[in-house]
Image (tube, helix red, strand yellow):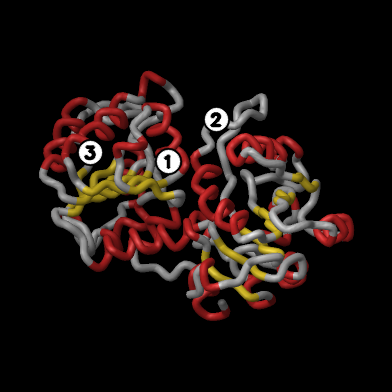
Amino acid sequence: MKGLKDFDCQGKKILLRCDFNVPLSQQGNILDDFRIKQALPTIKYLIEKRAKILLISHLNRPRGKELKYSLKVVGKRLEELLGTNVKFLPDCIGSMVEQEIDKMESNEIMLLENLRFHKEEKENNPEFAKKLADLADIYINNAFSVCHREHASVVGIIQHIISGQGLLLEKEIKVLEEIIENPKTPLIAIFGGKGDGFRAINKISERVDFILINELIDKEIKKRKIVFKNPEKIISPIDDINTFDIGPQTIDLFKEKIKKAKTVLWSGPLGKIEDKEYRNGSEQIAKAIIESGAFSIIGGGETMEFINQLGLSSKFNHLSTGGGAMLSFLAGEKLPGIEALRKYG
């Protein structure tokens, strides 16, 4: 795949696919700006190269044009972080957008409205993809976290425009490929979240020494009577309690496994972390990972938000912007966004 530095960006219109899918409060304020900050090195590089910078992203899962999911709030935060003006456009395609882009000067930054306000984005509609491609000279995918989605701004667009990977996408792939090809062992994966992590367990169990799972995943496995290829590698909670967190015996068991690890992958909180009452397990495991000295990778929006709230993000070796994308990549699955870049980029 071509990288950002393979292109002459000066004076060119660069369409940068970012992931600005940040958590919002009920009042519409950004609760965690981790994903916005991760895009900054690529944006700053394009500023240095005097490009015309067009930023596109989705935010949440709107049903049509729901203004509570407008990216306007992201534009304001970008202005604060970059110390420069970011012009916001209330759509991502159409004559108004085209006219504003035609007026752009080098070093200008425009943020286009939520891609998912158009249902054609998730449908990977070829006409919608072509309209996006026609806005720019070069397309750069910098959003690893959506590379497992076959959407217009991730896959379809690449057939219509010169394309490459951004600095963040390049970094994500490099770190995760190293884990696949040359991991330090014992290698442990921790699966949390809302009970659907079992989908990647089978494939990842072939690459790791142990997989630690939370209560919800354990219940779902038992409910569906799922049988894995390597069941001996899966460590389930052992506390006989019906709760939204892992219990004290499970915490001790998980800590013992983590203490011996050389590499730890963690995706998804272990309890219902939005309630303080059920945060203990996730907090204890986070601290155990740090204390182990293992090479640590964490991914997924909820996990990242929680780690940032604890003020521990700097203690981990790699903070992945992807949850599902990270797990799919590590499981050896082909991610549509990356495959499209390899084929057409």
**Which structural element holds mark 2?**
loop
- Cα–Cα gap, marks 2 and 1: 20 Å
Of callouts 2 and 3, the N-terminal one: 2
Residue at the top extreme? Answer: 277
Residue 314 vertical placement versus 151 (above, below): above
Work out which quarter of the rendered image holds the C terminus and state it. bottom right
Residue 193 location, quadrant: top left
Which residue occupies the foreground of this view, 81 or 67?
81
Coordinates of residue 322 in the picture (x, y in percent): 45, 51
Measured as percent of width and height from the top left, residue 2 is found at 50, 74
Looking at the image, is mark 3 or mark 1 nearer the viewer?
3
Q: Is residue 33 left or right of residue 110?
A: left
Q: CA distance from mark 3 to mark 1?
A: 21 Å
Packing grade of label 2 (10 A; few <14, some 14-19, many >=20) is few
Identify the disc placed on residue 82.
none
Q: On residue 289, which mark appears?
A: 3
Nearer to me, 193 or 145: 145
